[in-house]
Amino acid sequence: MPPRLPALTAYCRVAPVVSAPFTAFLLPFMQARNASILGALSDTPGAYSKRIRRGRGPSSGKGKTSGRGQKGQKARGKVAPRFQGGQTPQEIVHGTRGFENHFSVEMSPINLDRIQSWIDQGRLDPSKPITLKELNDSRCLHGVKDGVKLLARGKEQLKTPINILVSRASAEAINAIEALGGKVTTRYYTATSIKRVLKGESESTFTPLPYAPGADGQSPLLAALSSSAQPFTYRLPDPTSRKDMEYYRDSAHRGYLSHLVEEGHGPSLFYKTPGTYTRRRSKKTGAAASAAGDNRVW
Amino acid sequence: MASKGLLSFTRSFNTLRAFNASTKDPLVQCLAPRLSRSMATEAPLPSNMSEAEHGYNSFSMPEDPNPSSTVITTIYSFPDMEPLRFEYYNDKHLHLPLRRDILHRAVVFEGDMTRQGTASTKTRHEVHGSHRKIRPQKGTGMARLGTKQSPMLRGGGKSFGPHPRDFATQLPRKIYDLAWRTALSYRYRKGQLIVCEDGMDFEHPEGEWATEVFEHNNWGKADGRSLIVTADKRENLFEALGKAPQNGRAITTWDVDVKDLLETGRVVIEKSALDDILREHQSDLIGKVRNAQ
């Protein structure tokens, strides 16, 4: 049971109240109310337009025919938007041309002058690697579509060496950055992995997943998982289609898989590098050759 | 005319004050009758008490960072409401002009956002049952009828009934933030914003206790109830007001919205809660540029 309150009341100070209004002497005759301001709020009359109430009598101005005119299909119901009064509709006359390529990727472009401007404003830190997450967080990019392509517009304005990780990079942009002593790396991103990178669930790493098994034959993925106490929930995937693998194996693109290409080899997984293999001769010897000779029809 | 005269008098009074160095003292500013600005926590001194008894001279006086663009508030202890010290606030935080249109838009925005939008009815296609023709087309002497689900029939579907939807509307962030500070400024100008020291709580979770405190401070039902805002949930305070809801409501910073700030007779708020609200709702004052971490 709490102590009775007179003691508390005695030593309490009274909370501040608004000083008594001039009309205090009228109070016994007035009804004192604490009216909330909520009832007196309204938007500026010019800021909104009143809804037109159709079909609510002649004095409303939109009464009898509700602004739909006299008789006919438009007065009664609706007319299909493609209907042109009986004339053959445009989409039938001209048909549809072209197609939508479901496999195309739409890259968000980022140019060198914009990056330099962000660095000058202090919105990007050039001493740290610049990845998709930094670009998006600093609003240098307003969202990332299927990836980020680094382009060279305003390359002469770039003054700061940067270490940047993007999906693709143009040759000019690579040259401009490396001329200043910077570094460009391109890596593979999927739509899901971009989402996770931007949410901070994945690390925007320069290195691919480990491929080669460890010395004890343990799975390299499990070894990497156990060794790294990272706060990230997901790892980034590596490309599986030949086209993507070839792009990131190419050192001309500064691909993050280019270290996997052997010395003197090309990035292609289809064409072999000239001079790195010997043509197999179909020179058969002995009984096999004679048997083949015997089987000849003519 | 009368208000104009008062205004000019107030201006001249302000210039007079600016030249008089002794009146720049915040204590004197607080205790002097303030004609230009109503102070949120203006309290007339009881006539039978002197300043020394109150110990006002021991107040810590923070330096006014920018006298032209700050307003002053008193920080009280809770629940004994002893004035502890003064704090300065930016006048863009607590001294904005009243904008009824902005407040209206914020309150409507919140109301729209709060609507459940779960009303749901079945159309004639969703009502369960057979679509058999319920009586022959001709020969019965009665009206032609098709299926039982017709909206015309009892037990049939609802023709243009409600379906679940989202009533939420959009309001630009900067306007909403301005509305928050406008609401707090309105309270401040009316002297209805009472800022208390952090750690507001009651000793006992009793409704009678709350009623005594509220009535003693003229915060209770007769004075239009009060809103208590704290940074986090305080068990005794929240339970006591839950038992005596006629006195007012206690909510946390997380739960409070613009309409709550405008509803009751006054707002009693913890200093850290007020600072949190002001920090969260100043997007129209600070630039959007995020710096590199």
Image (cartoon, grey):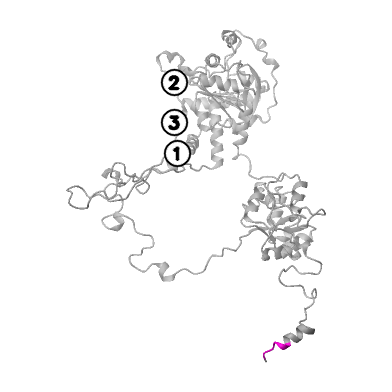
The location of residue B184, given as percent across then percent down, is 55, 30
In three-dimensional space, the C-alpha distance between marks 3 and 2, rounded to whole angstroms, equals 15 Å
Q: Which residue is mark 2?
A: A33
Q: Is residue A6 above or below residue A267?
A: above
Q: Is residue B83 above or below residue A62?
A: above
Q: Nearer the viewer, mark 1 or mark 3?
A: 3
In three-dimensional space, the C-alpha distance between marks 1 and 3, rounded to whole angstroms, equals 12 Å
Which span of residues is magenta-colored? Answer: A293-297
Q: Main secondary structure of the magenta part?
A: loop
Left or right of B128 on screen, residue B14: right
The location of residue B100, given as percent across then percent down, is 48, 34
Confirm whether the magenta stretch covers residue B16: no
Q: Which residue is mark 1?
A: A44
The answer to whether any part of residue B34 appears in the image is no
Left or right of B288 on screen, residue A122: right
Tell me the amino acid under the disc marked 3.
Ala
* Subunit that carries the residue with mark 1: A
Q: Residues within 10 Å of mark 1 (few under 14, many from 20)?
A: few
Tell me the amino acid under the disc marked 2.
Arg
